[in-house]
Amino acid sequence: MSKRDFYEILGVAKDVDKKELKKAYRKVAMQHHPDRNEGDKASEEKFKEASEAYEVLSDDQKRGAYDRYGHAGVDGSQGGGQGGGQGGGGAGGFGDIFGDVFGDIFGGGGGGGRRGGPQRGSDLRYTMTLSLEEAVKGCDKKITIPTLVACDPCDGSGAKPGTKPKVCSTCGGQGQVRMQQGFFAVQQTCPSCRGQGTTIDSPCGSCHGRGVKEETKTLNVKVPAGVDTGDRIRLSGEGEAGAMGGPAGDLYVQMNVKDHAIFERDGHNLYCDVPISIVDAALGGELEVPTLDGRVKLKIPAETQSGRMFRLRGKGVTPIRASSPGDLMCRVQVETPVKLTEHQKKLLKEFQASLKGEKHSPQKTTWFAGVKKFFEEM
C-alpha cells in the first residue's frame, strides 16, 4: 500500500463528500490510466495509488479507521501488499471500484445493469393528418399500423410450446459479461444470449425464437375537439410487444392539421380574407361570410379601407385545454374591378374628375405628406 496521504493523492480536503470524492478520483484515474500512458511506470504507480486511496475513502468504515489511525488502520483491509488496488474484481477490488466510478461511461458496473428477463416493448409514433374541420370539432378515425405483437403459440417466450428458455450459462442470466485486461475492465453484452440472460434450445416455429411477430392492426382513435398540429394522443399498450413476455410499449398519435382553403388558424382564433367591391367599401353594405358553423352576416360600414379587420366573437376554435372559443377575424380586401367596358371606364374617369380638389383619399394624403417631409429633411 502507498504510504502517501490518501487525501493528498486525490487532491481533496478531509471533509470531502462522496460525490466530490468520486469526481476527483475519476479525474486522476483518467489522467494516469495505463491505456493512456502505455509504458509509463510513473503514471502506472499514480494510477495504483489513486485506486487504493479511493477504495479506502469511499468506504465509510475504512475511511473512519484511516482518519483515526492512518495507514496502520487499513493495512490489513486491502488483502495484503497492493492487492487492493489491483484486484481482479473480487470484493473491494479494483474491478468494483472501476465499475462504480466509470459505469456511466462504459455501460454498467458492480454487477448491476442486468438485461435479462422481460423487457418493455418500444413506443411507436403515428402521424395523423386531419382537416381543419376535424381538428376543431373532433372526430373518430381508424388507423392501420405495422407493429410487433406477442407470438401466440409460445406466449412471447420464443421457446417451442412445452419448453422454456434456459438461464444462459455464460453470463449466469445477467445478460452481460465482465472482461478485464490488466487494469482495464469493461462490461459487455453477453455474446451467447445477446443480452437476454436466457438461451433457447428449441425455438418456436412460428416466431423463430423472437417471441414476437410482425403484424398490422387497425385501431379506432377518438380525436378530441380543438386539437392542433403538434398535439399528440397516447394509446397505452398499443406499441410494440415486449420481449420475453414483457409489457407492450405505447403508441403516440401525432396530429398534423392540413392548410384550409379559406381559414388560417392561429391558436384559438381563425383568420380569413373577405373580398368586397369598391362600391361596398365606399357606401357600406352587408354580405355573408363563412364560419365553421355556417354563414353569418357581416356589416360593412361606409368608407371602409382595404385591410380593415372585423371580429366575429365566438366563431373561432375552442382549444383542447380551454373552455371558451376564440374569434373569427375577417380581413376585408377591396377589389379593383377588371374587364371594364368602355362605358364603365368613361364613368370611372368622370367619377375621378369629380374628386379633384377634395380630400377623399385620407391614406393617400397622409402618405404624400410623409414623403414630402422625408425629402425636406434629407
Image (cartoon, helix red, strand yellow):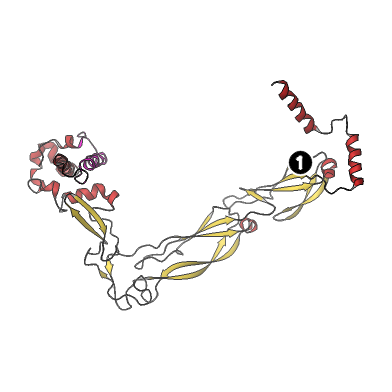
Please state the horizontal and vertical placement of residue 35, each as a whole percent of the image. 21, 46
Is-magenta flag for residue 21?
Answer: yes
Q: Secondary structure at mark 1?
A: loop
The residue most toward the bottom is 162
On screen, residue 343 above or below 178: above
309 to 121, vertically: above or below: above
Question: Which residues are the magenta region?
Answer: 10-35
Q: In the visual, does 7 lie left or right of 291? A: left
Residue drawn at the location 21% of the way across and 52% of the way down: 185
- How many other residues sit within 10 Å of disc 1, few (<14), some (14-19) or many (≥20)? some
Rendering coords of residue 52 (x, y %): 15, 43
In depth, the one of 103 and 137 nearer the eye is 103
State which quadrant residue 198 falls in. bottom left
x, y percent for residue 19:
26, 41
- In the image, residue 239 sits, relative to residue 325, either above or below, namely below
The stretch drawn in magenta includes residue 95: no
The image position of residue 255, as x and y in percent, is: 55, 56
What is the tally of numbered marks visible in this picture? 1
Dot 1 amino acid type: Ser
Quadrant of residue 136 within the rendered picture: bottom right
Provide the residue designation for mark 1. 306
**345 relative position to 190: left or right:** right
* Figure quadrant of the N terminus: top left
Q: Residue at x 35, y 77 (%)?
A: 205
The reply, left or right, for residue 214 in relation to residue 365 is: left
Question: In terms of depth relative to the viewer, which is nearer, 256 or 342?
Answer: 342
